[in-house]
Image (cartoon, rainbow, N blue to C red):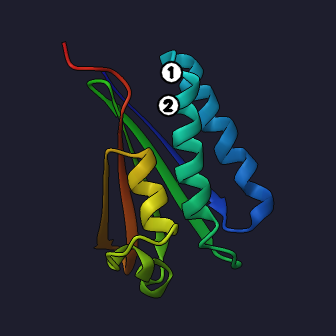
Amino acid sequence: MSDEIQLVLPAEEDFRHIAHLVVGGLGARLDLTFEHLEDLQLALDALLSRREDDGEVSVALRIVDGCVHTSVGPFAAEALDELERDDDELGLRRVLETVCDVVEVQERDGGSWVELTKQTRRAA
């Protein structure tokens, strides 16, 4: 099964609730556990809080074989500097790596995008 949802929102804090509604609806449709849903929403909040400007932020969620792949961006490179540091601080890197299975930063379309993967089903 492969489904994709793309959402483009103003980067302002007031619009983050819409992203939560979409992730919650996706979670209900896929019968995700509360823990998986909470992990996805925490990761999304951590990333969206890095953007508080007048621009737009895109969130794409794709479901493939029991994994939720999330792409969030674009970000200015310096907004994600914390992801490049390898330290033990309770920061963005540690939060994302705790709640997601894979965290990657990719450069595309003139900005930095964060790619997250969360396994929601165990392989058979």
Residue 96 locus on image (x, y percent): 44, 56
Q: Is residue 114 left or right of residue 5?
A: left
Amino acid residing under circle 1: Leu
Q: Residue furthest right?
A: 14
Kindly identify which residue carries mark 2. 36
**Callout 1 secondary element:** loop
Amino acid residing under circle 2: His
**Callout 2 secondary element:** helix
Residue 94 locus on image (x, y percent): 44, 61
- In this view of the protein, which residue sits in the foreground, 3 or 120? 120
Q: Which residue is drawn at the image coordinates 32% and 68% (left, top)?
A: 105
Q: Quadrant of the C terminus?
A: top left
Q: Is residue 82 above or below residue 7?
A: below
Q: Residue furthest bottom?
A: 78
Q: Is residue 44 left or right of residue 103?
A: right
Quadrant position of residue 93: bottom left
Q: Is residue 23 above or below residue 51?
A: above
Find residue 71 and name its label: none
Cα distance in 3D space between marks 2 and 1:
6 Å
Q: Quadrant of the N terminus?
A: top left
Packing grade of label 2 (10 A; few <14, some 14-19, many >=20) is: some
Kindly identify which residue carries mark 1. 32
Q: Residue furthest left?
A: 124
Q: Which residue is drawn at the image coordinates 71% and 78% (left, top)?
A: 54
Quadrant position of residue 51: bottom right
Q: Which residue is drawn at the image coordinates 31% and 75% (left, top)?
A: 86
- In this view of the protein, which residue sits in the foreground, 13 or 80? 80
Q: Which residue is drawn at the image coordinates 52% and 21% (left, top)?
A: 33
- In this view of the protein, which residue sits in the foreground, 108 or 100? 100
